[in-house]
Image: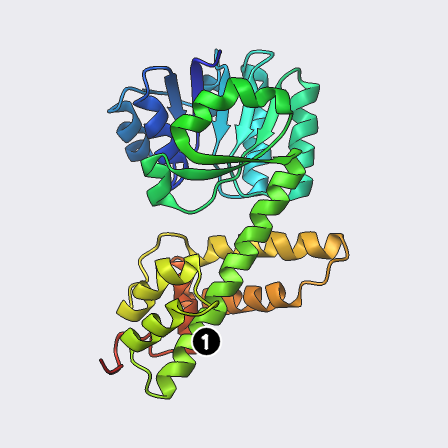
Amino acid sequence: MIKNIAVIGLGRMGGGIARNLAEDPRFSVTVFARTEETVAKCVALGAEGAASAEEAVVGADLVITSLPTPEVVLDVIGSALGSSPEGSIWMDTSTIDPCTAQDLEALVQTSGRSFIACPLGKGPAQAEAGELPLFVGGDKALLQPMAPVFECIGENAHYLGDPAAACMFKVASNMIGMTNLAVLAEGYTLCATAGVSDAAFEAALRDTGAWSYQAALRLPWMMQGDFENRFAIDLAVKDVRLAVDAAARRSVPAPVGAAGLMQLVSASVAGCGSEDVNAVLKVVDPAAIGQRPRGN
């Protein structure tokens, strides 16, 4: 039975996961992050703070990592792994490439511990609400002991196979979503040049096959000129680059994904890297919308 949980990385996704676990009486949670404020939020809900990743994992039945890049994941797990008990489970929720997932699985299993890849869907609001889609890869025998954890942090757990398969799905889904957003920005701006109002554009698009999760979530922000960071351009660049690179390694043509990546890179180069990914609109419309009449 999983009781003691360590969470390493308390960013927009990891913070929500840690806070939900900290409030659940079934678990005893220890957290570590480099930002004291994020640690304090979890401690206020009953978690314990640790001075290092190595300290956090001592005595943990389960270690959850939520970190920004594959390189950071490898570094943190590589340095802290030996401080955790043999037989513990390590679950990485970061968005990493399939090759790194395979390396982590080998590293963790060789040490006498178990590894699960569990990249996440949607965003910080769902992490905070405990309603994340979970894309699980690893030994099926781990699904039963992990069920209470999945129930606490997520809404649906999708088993996809081994860790590499789960991570491939995650980067592919981000490539699909971010490419969809890039072409949404183009279509939105194109219709504006013909005098289509915001209200008419949204109402009509909802009645077509072009409507999408990204449109439902981010089109209103585009229309308002709201580029506050919920999922940054630079993170989207990283994720889509991982997918395009994975496609190249497997000889899968991905020219549409590559074109979406270039739009995101252009937005980053234009100085929008720390803004929400809907700021890809600025590549198409440098006026940044929200500043020109769009009709009723």
Q: Nearer the viewer, residue 289 or 275?
A: 289
According to the picture, the residue beneath numbered tag 1 turns out to be 186
Residue 57 placement (x, y as % from top left): 48, 18
Q: Is residue 33 visible?
A: no
SS of the residue under disc 1? helix
Mark 1 is on which residue type?
Answer: Glu
Farthest right residue in view: 251
Viewer-proximal residue among 172 and 55: 172
Q: What x and y, as percent, mark residue 89?
A: 56, 20
Near mark 1 (Cα within 10 A), the count class, few <14, some 14-19 or many ≥20, is some
Question: Residue at 58% of width from left, 49% of height from top?
Answer: 171
Q: How many marks?
A: 1
Residue 42 picture quarter: top left
Q: Quadrant of the C terminus?
A: bottom left
Q: Is residue 61 above or below residue 258?
A: above
77 relative to 253 in the view: left or right: left
* Residue 202, percent from left and from top: 34, 71
Name which residue lies at 65% across and 34% down: 161
On the picture, is 209 further left or further right than 159?
A: left
Q: Nearer the viewer, residue 109 or 23?
A: 23
Which residue sits at x=65%, y=31%?
104
Residue 66: percent from left, percent from top: 47, 35
